[in-house]
Amino acid sequence: MRFKKIKFDNYRCFLNGEIEFCEKDGKNINLILGNNGAGKTEVLFAFWWLLYGFNFKQLKNKEATPYALNFSLYKSIQDGERNSASCSVEAEIEDGDTTYIVNRTAKYEKKPTTIAVTESQSIRYYKDNYELSLPVRDEAEVNKILTRIIPKPILNGIVFDGERMKQLSSLDDSSVKAIAGVINDITNVELLEQCHLTFEQVQKAINKKAKQIAKQKGNVSLNSLIGEIDELQTKVNKARSERQECVEKVADLKLQSRELSLQLDDIKEARLLEKQRREARTELEQEEARKANAIHSFTTSIADGYLASCEQLFSDVEQLLVEYDVPADLTVPAAKNILARPKCICGNTWTEEMIAELNSLIRKLPPDNINSAMGEKVHQLRVASGDKRKAVKNDFDSLNESNEKIKQLKDRIASLSTQITKSGSEAAEEIENRYQKLQDEIIRLSANLQNIDSRLPGMDKDLEAKKKLKATLSQGEADTITIEKESAFVEKCLIALEKIKGANRITALKQINKRLQEAYKMLSDDYDLGRRIYIVQYDQVSMFQIITYFENQYQDTLSNMQKKGTVASLKAMGQSDEEIQETAILSCAQPNSTGQSKMNTLAFVKAILDFANEPQSGGIFEMTKAYPLLIDAPFGDIFDKNLDKSAMSLHAFTHQIILMLAKDSYRDVEDYVGPFVSTVHLFEKEPNEDHSNIIVSSMEEI
């Protein structure tokens, strides 16, 4: 998709005017030039406001105009000079073969104690016969169309002002969510979730039909069982939803904790203590993960623990079997083979008495004789019971060891926390108090998470047993068998969708990380100095965060982890090589300067656009999407080779670029950017006024 035009009417610093965008002859940069305060960033906000609404009150250093209406017009309403005024932004957007006209209008009216604002949005589009459709005004329908053209999350990945560029690779929660939103969109998470919801609705309809059939046939047991399955499935779905919400909240709180931890790191008195506490917390998280595995293993072993108390039963069964004097290795096939011979194996001719005796023996041999089969089963269970006793003991010992180590680590963390509070810094104490509140909430949520995790396996097992019983009760009737097959198919679809969603995210992140490294190598001089870049894809706390690290430190860390046995331990816990490598990368994460943060963002933008605009293959559930890039002041705080590399590569990011620069900034990159500029618009602030003019210009006039 691409933007063709945007028009303003009384919108903030633009009383009127429009900008037409055009790409031709290999020139894909639409250049907007203007000094600070002329309205360049206001254009970015206009796209946001037009498409999905925008809270102007959240803007920093723009408190004077926390609304879409031009300041003078707003003030004239405040002062009673007029009763109302309106503003609007309208844009033409080309998506595939269709051109859409999107409009948002806000009307401001004077009320007794306030100024009320009413916003409305509409979409028109050109039909196949080139006629313009009637405006679509229904909010749900408008949102549906916009989501198809350019989903809201993707705006976070293609619209950047200077401030957002600096923040994207920080620990800022909104930036992490922006990255997550972009990646979720290009891997069609929303589509998969819609499919999941559809299949759940289909499953409910199938169950409803099955209950009706069971009721008609008088099968009370099946009818009741289907109701129980529906109720239990609802509880399982709710538990899983609560679990996911818990995981996300814990991750969010841990992210905030890391921000506070880094603030403590900046306070000289608390720095060393905080480093020690951070290391202890990392070790605690690893130990708690080991404990979770030990609990799971112990629970699994206990589930078969009944074997450990069956010795008396085994002995009683064996005593009963003593009455049947049957050779252990003699079976029915062996006896029948002997009987089939022309003579007995002893060489004598068969007699009727011998044949009768052998047939009598066959009736006592396994597998025809149930008692002999039981004897073999008792033998197998006795061997298994010994293994289970050992497994339970080992798991219990591991659990005790983890509990003891966790207690020691918590005591150490508590001691360090006290020392930080008493470090003599008021700032450290205030941050520490906030930090402890976060930790208390994390502990509460983690306990809730453990509770859900302890209940879910039993609920799943019960649900599976009921479904198997349902399948058994459904046998014998053609219509119920058909219903059961439909139900089984839908269940497999639901399982497949979950697997596809997880696999897509990991696959996409791997591919994006590869492109991110390539983009960083292309754009940043720091790459030649050994600096690397990475989007976290496994760690729940740091997931979707952009971090940088030095390759040599990473290799040293990974080598030390192998020597200390940490790698072997993590593998034993089920972690993959990629997860272990990420652990090493996270421990080497480096802080970023403002300029480095911008380079990180530029590399991320290119990686995302490369991924989104490139046709996907390999059978993963993705769709090709081509998006433009809107970017304001990308080269500020970037110098020397970084400036040259990023400026000469910008045109290759995507098919349409709307670039906003101050005139002086453009002079620094003109040689690199100029050859790819297609259109030029100048923003000039009207002297002694609060609005700017939009002037169509050319390269020669700059």
Image (spheres, helix red, strand yellow):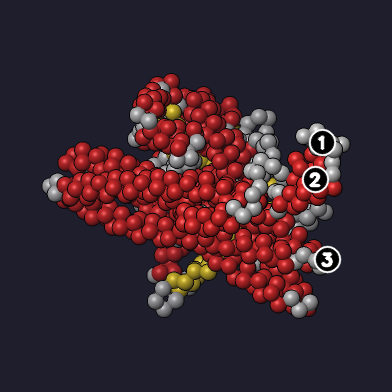
Depth order, front residue of 581/546: 581
**Residue at left offset 81%, top offset 48%:** 353
* Disc sitting over residue 354 in the figure: 2
Badge nearest the viewer, 3 or 2:
2
**Residue at left offset 67%, top offset 57%:** 491
Which callout, 3 or 2, points at the residue further toward the start of the chain?
A: 2
Label 1 crowd bin: few (<14), some (14–19), many (20+), radius 10 Å: few
Above or below for 698 versus 368: above
Contact? badges 1 and 2 (CB < 8 Å): yes
Badge nearest the viewer, 3 or 1:
1
CA gap, disc 3 and disc 2: 52 Å
Helix, strand or loop under label 1 = loop
Residue 566 screen position, x and y as percent: 38, 33
Above or below for 694 versus 103: above
Contact? badges 3 and 1 (CB < 8 Å): no
Depth order, front residue of 178/651: 178
The residue wearing badge 1 is 348
Tell me: 103 left or right of 248.
Answer: right
* Disc sitting over residue 18 in the figure: none
Tell me: 233 left or right of 432.
Answer: right
Q: Does the rendering let one see residue 701?
A: no
Depth order, front residue of 488/168: 488
Which callout, 1 or 2, points at the residue further toward the start of the chain?
A: 1
Residue type, label 2: Met
The answer to which quarter of the image holds residue 681 is top right
The residue wearing badge 3 is 478
